[in-house]
Structure formats: structure tokens, C-alpha cells
Image: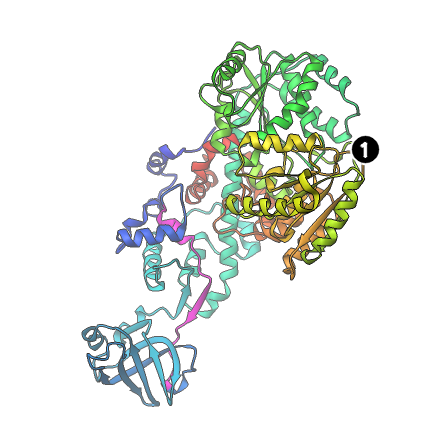
Amino acid sequence: MSIDAPSSRPAAVKDGCARGIEPLLKPLRSLRGIGPKGEELLNRLLAKPLTEPRIVDLLWHLPVGYLDRSPLASIEAATPGSIATLTVTPVKHSMPPKSASRAPFKVLCEDESGRMDIVFFHGDRNLIRRLLPLHERRIVSGRVERHGARLQMTHPDHILEVEARSQLPLIEPIYPLTLGLTQKFLLRSIADALGSLTPQAEWLDGNYLAAREWPSFEEALRLLHRPRTIADIALWPKARERLSFDEVFASQLAIALVRQDYRAASGRSLAGAGQLAQAMRSSLPYMLTRSQEQALAEIKSDMMSPCRMLRLLQGDVGSGKTVVAALSMANAVEAGVQTALMAPTDVLARQHLETLQPLCDAAGITAGYLSGREQGRARAAALAKLESGETQVLIGTHALFQSQVTFKDLGLAVIDEQHRFGVAQRLALQEKARNGYADILVMTATPIPRTLVLSLHGDLDVSQLTEKPAGRKPVTTRTVPLDRADDVIEGLQRALGQGAQAYWVCPAVESDTIREMAAAEARAAHLRQIFGEKVGVVHGKMSGAEKDAAIASFVARETSILVATTVIEVGVNVPNATVMIIENAEMFGLAQLHQLRGRVGRGSAASSCVLLYKSPLSETAKSRLDTLRQTDDGFIIAEEDLRLRGGGEVLGARQSGDPGFRIAKWPEAASMIEVAADQVKYRLANDPALKGAWGLASRICLILFERDDAVRLLHAG
């Protein structure tokens, strides 16, 4: 089954499942007083690059504080530096001469306790006279300061007639703003948005709501955006928790529906006798680990099932995922279908080719390679072999899902470092299979905490590789301040004298490959002054051929030091390299540091990693480096990275680790995900088609949080 796709949303509204929320789904321009300029500012504030903001999206923009505008008894009671709401009588307008354009317009006001000035700079004189007419009482609210012997209020936030007192919010929320947007405009817009809000049927379990003392969905929004008293402010944490859980619940429900729909779809059984896989095994110089055998058994069981496989294989650096993928691909080939392995970069794809080619040769399997580099006759020949079925295993990059690439019969698609691919790209590869029925195995070398697995990949079955192949030695890790870099270079000279090779990784500069390149080139130039031409360099601005040449020289030991940016994070396998130096390590994410460290310790020799940091370290940076020094367990590191940095960054520089939450924040969301997943599982068991009362209410939740649009795309993971 599937729930309403974006194109069918109007039908969902018509059939009654979303009755009452139609106004919330309208664009912002439908609010009173929102013109093109106001809409542009709100669009920038809400930051929704892929879809047009709706009225309900404005309600997801929650306040970060509040102002107490409760009226004070008198001017005398006002405290300088605070917000005051006073009832005063203007008694004098002091207009500056027209020649003194920068002088303020002052209005002297009084009450029974004393006097104060209300000050305007560059104000419309006639408007000020109308707002504060002499000898007529007015309510003014704003920040008061002492100026000389007298209090003054500059540009009051509110000026009202006494009869309009009810229009003044006694408790006024404070919102984050963007350049050009004012609190007053945002307050008015959100007040209009709240007018579109009506009570909705409850989608959360009543007992759970009562136990958590959470308000209803509608009341939670009203408490946050229009608190009436200080007592309402005390309920803000409960209201925020409620809305955060709603968002997590919608996410988990969407994932569960995708999983349910995927499992209901027909697939085909891929079963082989195991002879090709056994031939591969016989060529390996080592025995598989226990967790590799377990993962293979789980994958083989999925492939033999008549339902389509959708499985995540996650394992730490060097845990042997590629071998598991190779044996799975051998089973698929023996079952009579083609297989593909797609990697995000040419470096990683070619590394897979180097690993898989001898295994395929041992089993008599024909392997091919395709990336954006192949052109002309070579490309045409590769495509022809693939379409004829001669190529049984195809390894490549994004080029695999291009329209000209045609398989005779694709049965298994393996996607490595899957978080680096967009959903549409993964879907495009799967659709190259006959009737779209390919089994999917996605892999990551970045261990993902359980909470993020549920949040990001709850529609996938998960296999974990928890051991490293025999012979791998732990990497000794130490932290050194950057002002002792000369000591590190002396140690590097000794290591190179004993035949070692080393990486020197330069600081990551997010979204700035020019600066990364400059840092790498400068460090390489410095090291060449000491080590001569034994220093190579590789960075993101080099062409693919240049990168390959630099890495090939390092592999061939023509160079002893490879200065690099994070392009070597995955896909570079040089067993002789035993030293990793990471400069400005405090600038890297914990998971990314762990990935870089994984480039050494790949042979039988002892290896070391030096984390060069710039003092002083923040507490978070210190905790990050201490964690890396104390453990090499990627799963422990992933959990700590989640705790320190949140779900949006746990996979590195804002890769696709963020579940897309607007309200729920980490680590709060992490504690909610498992609870929401359990509730969804229980409720779907009783209402799998979302046709009952709970199901119809839940459809509303999905629409409000835009998870109905995500369901179709989530088929690709």
C-alpha cells in the first residue's frame, strides 16, 4: 500500500482525511498583509529550498524567549534596562529644528508618579503627533533607559489607546529573525497563521499523552505562539516536547509505510548453488570473520526470498564489507542475473575494482568498469558488453544510472557509502532492473548509531560487521599541539628512514576546495624543503587522472609522504602506509577523523596516528580528540559523535545524516525515535492501510510534517 503522493494531495483533502487543515497547507502569500517582499523575507527565514513554504511551516518557527509586557503601576516603578508597559499622558512635543536633522523628536509624558521622555529618531512628525496626542492617555510598551535625571523610552514597540488594551500581548514571544524581518511583522504573520488552526483528531496514544502531561497538538502551538500568562511559559517545555514527538512520529510512520509497501511488492528469488562464491573464498588468504559469515547468511536469505531485498551493511573501517558484497554478487551471478556496485568517487570505485577483479577472475566472472572518464569507443564497447550480458559485474560511479547505461538483466545493486548519494540517484539505478525488481544492498563504512539507523534507515534491514580481519593491529593515537609540529616532523624522518610511508592530511574547509587546495599545496611545499621529491600531494581541485597518478606514485612507493585533503577519507588502501598525521584535527568531525585514521593500520606493521591541534581547544573539541585517542571502535565513536554534534553532522560535513527535523533537536530526538518506532509498529499492525480513526488522524500528521511527499522517494532508502 502507499499513502497519498504529492500529486494526489487535493484528493486526500476532498475525501475528508485532511478536513480542517486545508488553510494550513496554503502558501504564505495567502496570509493577510503578506506581499512579495514579506513573502521573500519569510521564505528566507524558513529556509525550504526544495518546496514552497506553507502557512503551517510558519508555525514550526518557534520562539526562543519572551518579553513580559504586564503593565506597571507607574513610571516610578520602571527599572532602567528592562521592558516596561505604562499608561502615560503626553504633555509636550519637542520638535527639533529642521536644520538639526539628526536630533530626536521627544514627547514628554507623565503619570501621577513622575515624568519620562519618549524619543523618536527620523520619525514622521505628523504620525507621532497622531499616535501621542497631547493630554490624551496612551499605553506605551518598550525598553526604558535612564538618560540624565529622567527615564526615556526610544521607539516604543507598542503605542495603544487605553480602550485598545486587549490588543497588547501581555506575554510576547521572541523569534529568531533574518535580515530585514522585524519582530512586529513576524508576530502579526504568526497571529494570522494561528487563525488557520483548528482542533484535530489525536494521532498519539492517549495514555502516553497523559503520562507525559503533554497538551493537544493545537494547544501546544497556541501555548508557544500566544502565551497568555507566565504560567503558560512554564508549559513551553511540554509543548515543545509534544511537537518534537509529533515530528519524529511522522518520520517513523513514513519509514514504516515505505518498508511495508516495499515488502508487499513482488520480487524474485535469486538462489545459486554457491560454487562461484566458493571459488572466491578459496582465493582469499584469510578466513572470514564471524560477523561476515552472519551478514552473508542474512543477505543470502533475503536474496532467496520472493520479496525484494533492501538491506544496509554497516561496518567499521577495514571490517571487510567489500568481500561480503563480492560473495553476494557471486551468488546473484550464479542465479543468472547481472550485478552493479556504485561508489561515490572515482578513487573509491577504482579501489573496489582492484579488490573485486582478482576475486571475479578466480570465480570466472566477467567484471567491467564505468565512470565519467570513459569516452568514445571504449565507452561504447563497455556499454555494449553490459547490454548483451557479457559483463556480469559492473563497478562504477554515478555514471551507472545514466540513461545510456542498459543492463540485460540487473538483479542486485550494491551502493557503497550510500549517504553520499541522493534518493533520486539510488532510485534511478534500481529502475534499470527488469520491472524495477532489483535487490538493493547499501553499505557504509561510517558506523551509524541505532537511533540514527531508525531515523534514517528504518525501512532497511541491517547487518553489522563488528570485527576486523585477523592480522589487523590497533592504531596508536596521540594528540600533539600544533606548536610542536617540528617534533612530529623529526619523528616522521625516523619512521621514513625505517621504510614507512605517511599521510599528512590538511584542514578541512567546508565548501571551500580552493582554500583546501592552498593549505595542501603550502604544506607539501614545506615538507619538500625537508624531504625533497618524496612528497606527493592530492586534493579536490585536481583532475581524476592527476589524483590517480598521485595515489599510484604513493602505492608504488615512489613517494613516501602523501599530503592530502579529505579526498583520501575512503577508497585509498596502501598497507605499507603506517603513519597518519592530521593537521588542525579539531576542525574535523569525530567520525571523519576515525575514517582518516582508518587509512593506516591496514597491514601487519604497527601504525600510529598523530592529531595536531591548535590551542586552546573548546570542551567539545577536547572531548572529540580524547575519544579518538581512547578507542578505535567505530560504533562507540559514532554514538559519541551523535552526542557531541547531533544527528545532522554525525556523518561528516553536513552529509545526509540529518533526518530533516525542523522542531525535534538532538539529543532530544534520539530518545524519542525508538519510542515512536515502537508505537508506529503497534498501531500499524492494527491499521496497516491507515483507514481507521487512528489512521486518518495519522494521515493528517504526515501531511502537516510533509512526510506524505517523502513516502514515494523513501522507496529508494
In the image: residue 216, left or right of residue 567: left
Q: Is residue 69 magenta?
A: yes
The relative height of residue 432 versus residue 252 in the rendered view (above or below) is above
> Horizontal and vertical percent for residue 308?
57, 23
In the image: residue 406, left or right of residue 167: right
What residue span does the magenta drawing correspond to? 53-75
Instruction: Examine the image and state in which quarter residue 184 appears.
Output: bottom left
> Horizontal and vertical percent for residue 489?
72, 49
Q: Nearer the viewer, residue 531 or 203?
A: 531
**Disc 1 crowd, CA 10 A, few/some/many (<14, 14-19, 20+):** few
Please tell me whether mark 1 sits on a helix, a strand or a loop: loop
Q: Nearer the viewer, residue 658 or 121?
A: 121
Q: Which residue is mark 1?
A: 471
Whether residue 638 is visible to the viewer of this picture, yes or no, is no
Q: Residue at x 62, y 20 (%)?
A: 305
> Horizontal and vertical percent for residue 674?
61, 44
Q: How is the image coloured?
A: rainbow
Q: Is residue 627 magenta?
A: no
Q: Nearer the viewer, residue 376 or 59?
A: 376
Q: How many marks?
A: 1
Q: Nearer the viewer, residue 242 or 56?
A: 56
> Horizontal and vertical percent for residue 166?
31, 70
Q: Residue at x 51, y 42 (%)?
A: 251
Whether residue 323 is visible to the viewer of this picture, yes or no, is yes
The relative height of residue 67 versus residue 222 in the rendered view (above or below) is below
For the residue marked with disc 1, what is the amino acid? Gly
